[in-house]
Image (tube, grey):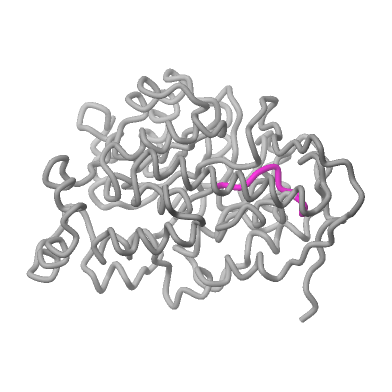
Amino acid sequence: MKWVSVYEMRRQARRTLPKMVYDYLEGGALDERTLRSNPTSYQNWRFLPRRLIDLSAVRPETSMFGRDIAFPAVVAPTGLNSLFWPRADLALARAAQRCGIPFTLSTASSMSLEQVAELSAGRLWFQLYVIEPGLALSLVERAKAAGYECLVVTVDVVANGKRERDLRNGFGLPVRYSLRTLWDGLCHPAWSWRYLRHGLPVLGNFNASRVPSPEARAALLRRSMDESFDWAALDAIRQNWPGKMLVKGVLHPDDIERCRKMGIDGVVLSNHGGRQLDDTCSPLDVLAQLAPTPGFDILVDGGIRRGSDIAKAVALGARAVMLGRAALYGLACGGEAGVSHALSLLQEEYRNTLVQLGCPDTALLDAGYVRREAR
């Protein structure tokens, strides 16, 4: 493929997708200051390379839950991916498998968790939105039965963020057609042809036979989360899940420590890519202030567009990063092949950064290689 960076794939995605769809992918909450500050937080850190190091055998690999991954990254959970490409969840899973990293399937996936597990052979994680308690436990049981390795519980979507791009565009499912949306579709014929052939996404995990109660069905129709979800409810999920478990969407040090004491295996520092609460702290800046805790993994997401961004996160203490929009730009450009290309670009950039830093192994990458730029 011709693109040489994730930024070029982003520009291609903008040309390829109708405005409503691209804005759903790219947009953030309110004034989108958090959306813009997430990438900027990486720019605030500078490298301090070492020289005269033997770099004949650089090792970009690391481990996640005791198993090797090709570089410190995981494909993040993202919903309604079939807006961007047909059977998108499977395309993402297979691209992650080819690249040698885990893939996280969203509760709001377009394909069911059973379908993705049956049709892909890589390392699969499942992300849980707690919409209604009974429904949440049902999804946990299904993920367990399907062999998912890790459960990622998202806790920062008690209420939906105000995304003004979506409000202006009238975005929602099912799509409400207007002259503007029809014209936008005509101006993007390749996307429209795929839509006509395959249809717009559905919530693959929620057909009628798998929604256990009237309360759960009502919550789904409202597209609302369980506002009563608290630490006791999180502990109940922990007790029902025998595998590895991460909590995604925490930033406060007290919450991180409480997760550790509860027996959670790690957290994903996240402000939901700037899509929920605007003016939220950058996950990278929070990471830089945390003391390392052996046996408790810290991941980060938000604003990662370069392999050098991944290196900065790892140097500051992250076990790995989660890749959301970067993977979706590739998906919009070319389906599975596009995702594979985006992931390969980041993997190559990460390895090159290690070489340029004089760091022969991910395991040796630490805070000594970075300095915060003086303000």
Asked whether 241 or 231 is in front, the reply is 241
- x and y, in percent, of residue 164 in the image: 33, 73
The answer to whether any part of residue 318 appears in the image is yes
> Residue 211 lies in what quarter of the image?
top left
- x and y, in percent, of residue 338 in the image: 40, 45
> Is 168 positioned to the left or the right of 328 in the image?
left
Position of residue 126 relative to residue 275, above or below, is above
Position of residue 358 relative to residue 26, above or below, is above
- x and y, in percent, of residue 159 in the image: 41, 59
Please say whether residue 132 is one of the residues in the magenta stretch. no
- Residue under the point 56% across and 34% down: 101
Furthest residue in direction right, as rendered: 52
- Residue under the point 79% across and 69% down: 372
Position of residue 147 relative to residue 79, above or below, is above
> Is 73 positioned to the left or the right of 90 in the image?
right
Asked whether 213 or 103 is in front, the reply is 103
- Residue under the point 63% across and 65% down: 282
Furthest residue in direction bottom, as rendered: 375
- x and y, in percent, of residue 60 in the image: 71, 39
On-image quarter of the C terminus: bottom right
The answer to whether any part of residue 226 appears in the image is no
Asked whether 247 or 327 is in front, the reply is 327
Please say whether residue 317 is one of the residues in the magenta stretch. yes
Q: From which residue to which does the magenta span run?
A: 315-322
- Residue under the point 10% across and 64% down: 182
> Residue 371 lies in what quarter of the image?
bottom right
